[in-house]
Image (cartoon, helix red, strand yellow):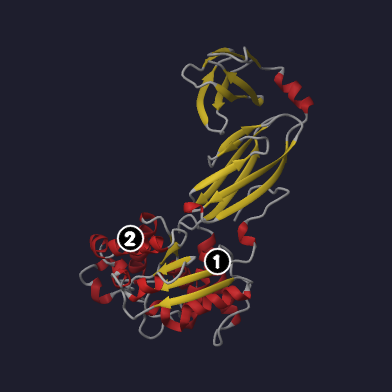
Amino acid sequence: MKFKIAFLFFFPISLFAQNYDVLFLGNSYTFYNNMPNLISQIALSLDDTLNPTSNTPGGWKLEDHAAQNSSSLQLLNQQKWDYVVMQAQSQEPSFPPSQVEQQTYPFAQSLVDSVLANDSCSEPMFFMTWGRKNGDAQNGVGYPAIATYQGMQSRLRSSYLEMGFDNNCSVSPVGMAWKKSIEQNPDFELYIGDESHPNLAGSYLSACVFYSSIFKKSCVGSDFFPLGLDSADVLNLQAIASSVVLDSTEVWNLFDVQNVELNRTEIDGYDFIVEASNYDSIYWDFGDGQFSDIDSVFHAYEINQTYTVELSIFSKNNCKKIEFSYNIDTFNISDVEELQSTIRLYPNPSNRYFNIETEEASTIQVFNLQGKKIMEVMKNNSFQLDLAGVEKGLYTIRVIDQKGIQNFKIIKDE
């Protein structure tokens, strides 16, 4: 997570130890080297807990997992799961878009529906796999786009992201971490001899990606790695996985907060800005009895006070929550008197017209109590603001000119 400015209190949920039950529905790509257990060991080394359960018959497609009374659905319905990871057969998402749309997407949707029917708070997550080392030579004859590693990886990326966004669920970008590793060091091997399945390093890299995707934390510094891997290589794989996931959580549709900004705009107001992904709702408590459910809002305060601002961001169905808390101070009242002498606003209250006297051209913005901008006009010097059609209530008028920005609380009568 990246934040533009520091505040007195900041408690993202991801700082604390987490414990998740995770079901993996895949095939040999998940099964090789017991990849779910590698994730569990990485988590333990970083004071987190992942309890994995798997169903990974060789060659299974999403259609097989989604079939009525399949072993996957029976396992799914045995308990509530925090995450259910779904992996398609290694080639099927790379086929031509029309074929994938007909033969893969319907079963992805069916599987997601089954996950949520069992528990609406489970998070379905697609396992974006990697392209074969030299592409899909057999199917590449009829569809040249996947005849190379790069082409096959591109198709896998597109299809998995489409499955994620179409079904409002997340994607673990394992294939993109493989791509980054291959680009950085083409001689570092991730495949076994069949140029398809992962060797131990490939499975470890995949596990690192899943750790960061599920826990929303870097895995750099984990002291767990299997025998046979070099410690320097392990550190590099950890760095690759963490950066691929955490630098682009919005791309992978992970429930996460990328950025929070509280920017003082003038004498008594702030712009509150949130950039988050795969969330259901946002709730600002401005600390002065006013609230908003808009991600990016403006809010004006009274003078000479300290306020505690609380921000809550909820995942779909309000199942998970990320919270932040900040203390902010307004400017001194002497600054207000000096600035406000250049602008007059009257009458206030008014049932329609508000006269605004300025010394130069200005931009006028009107905000409701929730911080949503409902009007913006540009005027030269003094003018009359017409609020016909605006509901009665309390509003903030922001006046912006070359000397700065000023806010006025107004009351719109009947």
Left or right for 175, reference 89: right
* Crowding near the residue tagged with mark 2, few <14, some 14–19, many ≥20 C-alpha atoms within 10 Å: some
Q: Residue at x 53, y 72 (%)?
A: 208
Q: Residue at x 35, y 71 (%)?
A: 73
Residue, disc 1: 242
| Amino acid marked by disc 1 | Ser
Q: Is tag 1's residue or tag 2's residue first in the polypeptide sequence?
A: 2
| Amino acid marked by disc 2 | Gln
Of helix, strand and loop, which one carries label 2? helix
What is the spatial separation of the Cα atoms under label 1 and label 2, in whole angstroms? 28 Å
| Quarter of the image that includes the N terminus | bottom right
- Residue 4 in the image, given as x and y percentages of width and height: 64, 48
Task: Kindly indicate the quadrant of the structure image that contains residue 349.
Answer: top right
Residue 109 is marked as 2
Q: Residue at x 35, y 58 (%)?
A: 162
The answer to whether residue 278 of the structure is visible from this angle is no
Query: In the picture shown, does residue 244 fall above or below 374?
Result: below
The answer to whether residue 159 of the structure is visible from this angle is yes
Of helix, strand and loop, which one carries label 1? helix
Query: In the picture shown, does residue 311 fall above or below 130?
Result: above
